[in-house]
Amino acid sequence: MQVPSPIEYARATSVDHAIALLERLGEEARIVAGGHSLLPMMKLRLASPEYLVDINDLHDDLAYVRFSEGEVRIGAMTRHRELLESDTLNAVFPIFRDAERVIADVPVRNRGTLGGALCQADPSEDLSSVCTTLDARCVIRSSQGERTVSMDDFHRGPYQTAVGQAELLTEVRIPVRPHGGSAYAKVDRRAGDWAVVAAGAAVWLEDGLIVDARVGLAAVGPNTTGIPRISSALRGRRPDDEAWAVAGEIAASGCAPVTDGRGTVDYKRHLADELTRRTLLTAAERAAG
């Protein structure tokens, strides 16, 4: 039996210190925050870093929900529990509370972070679907400065992101638009499990018509899946069952699930259809209310 190599550990005291550690330690270094993504992968030998850079001391600097210049800014170290309990955030984007209520269990929600969830880049991960639905942008920092990428560009494949070796995801920015509503729904095999299929939806209304709508699906492809055709199909329509049926059909045909232990392709396409209809209906009701 091969004995695993010892892992060296460093605790960052600031964002700049964390980046400097990543630069010095090289490609074999990994960030650990809540640990609920990386540590299970290490136990399964799916990840074997030589160095761990702990950023938990950065919580005070990178855990926040702020409104600034027409957008919500959320620090990457904001924990699931803090997102769930933020009345300010959920008054604007109730999709977060919908999603957080079905993410894992209390211990995971107490420690896991927004940044860790997004950087895991698991195709079944819930907050990636939420951020895709809300057209979020991710702020990535290095010793050279900051850059901002869309969610479409942030996830580059299963478990692959735009965050480079000596870079750190520091913030997520979400535009705030008037007359909007959002919702999230998930089907799983047991409470807190990875999704069989999940859907997030956001709808914006004006004069009783849909001015924009977005849908983000999880667990139906190699990445979290945005469905741009839904947006173009719903603009200018009334928010009714006929519109939701059109969107559901587009979602079912526009995703790419595979048959696995959670279900068949046909079953997952059915769920994509049904959950898209449900979340769009709820989002529209919230927008109208």
Image (cartoon, rainbow, N blue to C red):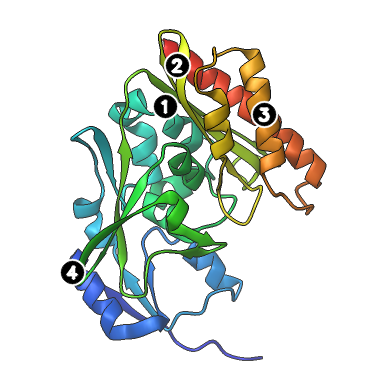
- Horizontal and vertical percent position of residue 248: 67, 29
For disc 4, the marked residue is 16
Callout 4: SS: helix
For disc 2, the marked residue is 286
* Other-residue count near label 1 (Cα within 10 Å), few / some / many at <14 / 14–19 / ≥20: many
For disc 1, the marked residue is 94
Q: Nearer the viewer, mark 4 or mark 3?
A: 3
Q: CA distance from mark 4 to mark 3?
A: 45 Å
| Left or right of 216 in this view: 7 | left
- In the picture, residue 41 is in which quadrant? bottom right
Q: Nearer the viewer, mark 1 or mark 3?
A: 3
Q: CA distance from mark 2 to mark 3?
A: 19 Å
Q: Residue at x 38, y 40 (%)?
A: 81
Q: Amino acid at mark 1?
A: Pro
Q: Amino acid at mark 4?
A: Asp
Callout 2: SS: helix
Q: Nearer the viewer, residue 46 or 155?
A: 155
Q: Residue at x 71, y 34 (%)?
A: 271
Q: Quadrant of the C terminus?
A: top left
Query: Are circles 2 and 4 on residues that touch, CB within 8 Å?
Result: no
Q: Is residue 262 visible?
A: yes
For disc 3, the marked residue is 248
In this rendering, is residue 140 above or below 275?
Answer: below
Q: Residue at x 54, y 49 (%)?
A: 125
Earlier along the polypeptide chain: callout 2 or callout 3?
Answer: 3
Residue 209 circle label: none
Earlier along the polypeptide chain: callout 1 or callout 4?
Answer: 4
